[in-house]
Image (spheres, helix red, strand yellow):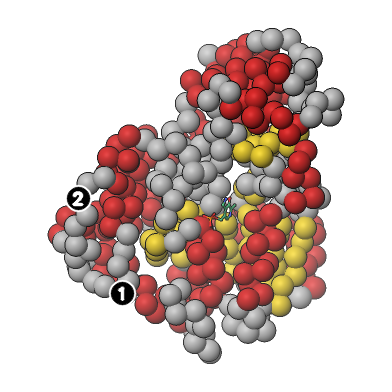
């Protein structure tokens, strides 16, 4: 129950285990092409350019920065935690002058603050972390994308912990890049950096005055490859991770057959009931209110009266693995539970009972069964 890598569907794992074919074999060309087409559906970007590259989510972040930033460009980072701060570091590496708007822990940056920053300086690009996995805080990207449009700034959404778990309408909201990694709600073992780029993002890259300084990330190398697979033609730049891409096609088909809107509703319902269950135990969560609490994971403070460091171990006695804290300042005061992808209400029931067991072991005082009762009453 950690927030990635998640538990994968058996069909996805079976697809991973199929014979590895040539990257130009007809069956693989079809799978790669299907995966690219399905991404456009799931991202809601019918005219976007999907890219599937071997690497982790950080590569997707890096690739957007490498291709869109030139030395001296101004970039605005809206940070709600650890991964926002990482984006600032990546952008600096490509020579950007970065302004970072940092939310207080558990809060979001207000639209007024963002608009003031955009009024006061001209930016090439802004980044949003949709769900910061260190805090479980959800940012609403829609009004920020609208502001970016108003001030003619490119918008990049780090959707590593949100794509296929939170609502995203890339094209109608006007987001220029929406990026993610395979191991989260997309439901494929780690190893794929995924993104969809808007026409404007591609044009910005085409109009660069200086070459992209990162050879592997350069869209000049990858766009012809993606376009070839979309046209079901063989192509080569770097050997694609054949098995992971076949697994991606399988997982995207599963999401597509549930219907992306239904997938997101399922995430919403489970997350909201899980949060209520956690609160019924007398615990506090990091996000300041429900509107900014993610569907994909929940960050929960250890109760003050117990030694929190012993809780994850006690929970794992019932075979439920949860994650510790990640935000350096408060790392030892909270834990995180992922609930994305194939997670079902059965998994949540098991998790809540393990959390209750763990809390009991630490001597915390609560009404046994209360979180299960709360959860059940909300999902029935
Ligand atoms: N952004 C967010 C919001 C993430 O949660 C993560 C990974 N937890 C990353 C970026 C980086 O992804 P990866 O670990 O796959 O490089």
In the rendered view, does 313 fall on the left or right side of 329? left
Crowding at dot 2, Cα within 10 Å, few <14 / some 14-19 / many 20+, comes out as: few
Determine which of the numbered discs, if any, sits on residue 237 in the image.
Answer: 1
Q: Can residue 261 be seen in this view?
A: no
Which image quadrant is residue 320 in?
top right
Kindly tell me whether mark 1's CB lies below 8 Å from ligand 1. Answer: no
Where's ligand 1: which quadrant? bottom right
Q: Residue at the spot x=29%, y=53% of the render? A: 243
Q: Please tell me whether mark 1 sits on a helix, a strand or a loop.
A: loop
Q: Nearer the viewer, residue 327 or 156?
A: 327
Residue on which the image places disc 2: 19
Q: Can residue 282 be seen in this view?
A: yes
Q: Nearer the viewer, residue 360 or 200?
A: 360
Cα distance, mark 2 to mark 1?
A: 22 Å
Q: Please tell me whether mark 2 sits on a helix, a strand or a loop.
A: loop
Q: Which residue lies furthest to the right in this view?
A: 305
Q: Which callout, 2 or 1, points at the residue further toward the start of the chain? A: 2
Cβ–Cβ below 8 Å for labels 2 and 1? no
Q: Residue at the spot x=27%, y=63% of the render? A: 230
Q: Report the mark closest to the observer, 2 or 1.
A: 2
Q: Where is residue 218? Give x, y as percent.
A: 44, 77
Q: Quadrant of the N terminus?
A: top right
């Amino acid at each position: 129950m950690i927030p990635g890598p998640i538990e994968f569907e058996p069909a996805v794992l079976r697809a991973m285990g199929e014979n590895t074919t040539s990257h130009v074999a007809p069956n693989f060309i079809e799978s790669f092409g299907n995966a690219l087409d399905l991404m456009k559906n799931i991202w809601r970007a019918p005219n976007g350019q999907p890219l599937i590259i071997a690497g982790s989510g950080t590569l997707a972040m890096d690739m957007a920065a490498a291709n869109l930033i030139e030395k001296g460009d101004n970039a605005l980072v809206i940070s709600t935690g650890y991964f926002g701060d990482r984006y600032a570091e990546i952008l600096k590496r490509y020579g950007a002058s970065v302004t970072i708007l940092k939310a207080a822990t558990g809060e979001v940056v207000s639209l007024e603050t963002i608009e003031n920053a955009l009024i006061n300086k001209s930016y090439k690009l802004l980044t949003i972390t949709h769900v910061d996995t260190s805090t479980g805080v959800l940012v609403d990207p829609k009004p920020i994308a609208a502001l970016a449009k108003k001030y003619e700034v490119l918008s990049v959404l780090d959707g590593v912990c949100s794509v296929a778990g939170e609502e995203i309408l890339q094209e109608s909201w006007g987001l220029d890049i929406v990026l993610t990694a395979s191991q989260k709600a997309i439901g494929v073992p780690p190893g794929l950096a995924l993104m969809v780029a808007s026409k404007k993002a591609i044009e910005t890259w085409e109009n660069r005055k200086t070459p992209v300084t990162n050879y592997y990330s350069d869209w000049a190398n990858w766009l012809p490859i993606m376009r070839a697979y979309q046209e079901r033609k063989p192509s080569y730049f770097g050997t694609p991770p054949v098995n992971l891409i076949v697994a991606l096609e399988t997982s995207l088909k599963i999401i597509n057959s549930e219907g992306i809107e239904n997938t997101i509703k399922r995430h919403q319902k489970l997350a909201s009931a899980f949060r209520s269950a956690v609160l019924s135990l007398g615990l506090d969560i990091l996000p300041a209110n429900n509107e900014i609490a993610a569907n994909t994971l929940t960050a929960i403070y250890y109760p003050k009266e117990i030694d929190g460091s012993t809780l994850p171990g006690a929970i794992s006695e019932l075979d439920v693995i949860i994650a510790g804290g990640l935000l350096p300042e408060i790392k030892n005061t909270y834990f995180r539970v992922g609930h994305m992808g194939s997670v079902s209400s059965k998994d949540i029931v098991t998790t809540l009972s393990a959390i209750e067991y763990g809390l009991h072991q630490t001597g915390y005082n609560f009404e046994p069964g209360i979180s299960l009762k709360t959860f059940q009453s909300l999902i029935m």
